[in-house]
Amino acid sequence: MQHPALGILIGGSSHVGKSTLAGALAGSLGRELISTDALGRHPGRPWPSVRPEVAEYYASLTDDTIHWFLKVHHENMWPRIRQIIDNHRQRAKPFVLEGAALRPEYVAELDPGSVTAVFLYADDDFLRQRMLDEARRDERYEQKAGIINKFIERSLRENRDMLQSARAADIRCVDVAAPGAVEAVVQAFSAG
């Protein structure tokens, strides 16, 4: 695989391994690593600690509203993300950018000559188990099980929706549950 002249974008829902892959690629290729998490936090995973307003968010909103609000949050972040990409292009500074806000429908609008996008996904059972394993390490898991389940369902729905969008946009999709899939991506870019 030929790596891009400018940027590599790693998108996907919660817990698919975006940060891990992006860190490996940035290190391997000597590129700046940027996370959309630093740009703005949506009520995220409700563990190990959860602020009262985040608990209220998950407990009081319907699944449809939670999903809608996440999409609005990503839409609101996109101008800043686009600015970061454009600034790096103007300075010819190679980078790896990762985050759930890299929605395939927005990424598809970018010049394919300046960035290469990879979308990470997994089946529901794999992602659910990955999130439950992490959440259960929290000693207060039982007290927060309801909001944790809302977070997991939101993430699974987002995973399915974005996968469909990534495939429609012809963005490379990588199933992180497949043995060696993530390592193969790093190797392919590194071999460039």
Image (cartoon, grey):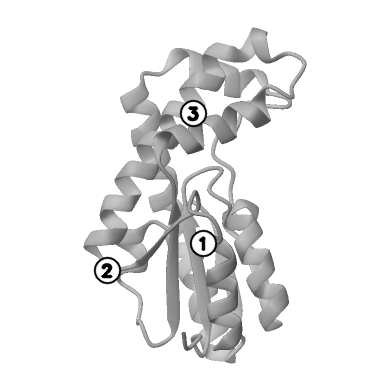
Say whether disc 2 or disc 1 marks the residue closer to the N-terminus. 2
| Disc 2 to disc 1, C-alpha distance | 18 Å
User: Is 174 situated above or below 122?
Assistant: below
Q: Report the residue at 53% width, 12% height from top.
A: 146
Q: Earlier in the sequence, mark 3 or mark 1?
A: 3
Which residue has dot 1 on it? 181
The quadrant where residue 106 appears? bottom left
Is residue 77 rendered to the left or right of residue 39? Answer: left
Look at the picture and state if 141 lies above or below 88: above
Disc 2 vs disc 1: which is toward the camera?
1
- State the SS at label 1: helix
Left/right placement of residue 164 relative to residue 192 reads: left
Along the viewing direction, whichever of 93 and 75 lies nearer the viewer: 93
Task: Where is residue 70? Give x, y as percent.
Answer: 42, 39
The residues bearing labels 3 and 1 have C-alpha atoms spaced at a distance of 23 Å
Residue under circle 3? 152
Q: Residue at x 30, y 71 (%)?
A: 109
- The residue singled out by tag 2 in the image is 170
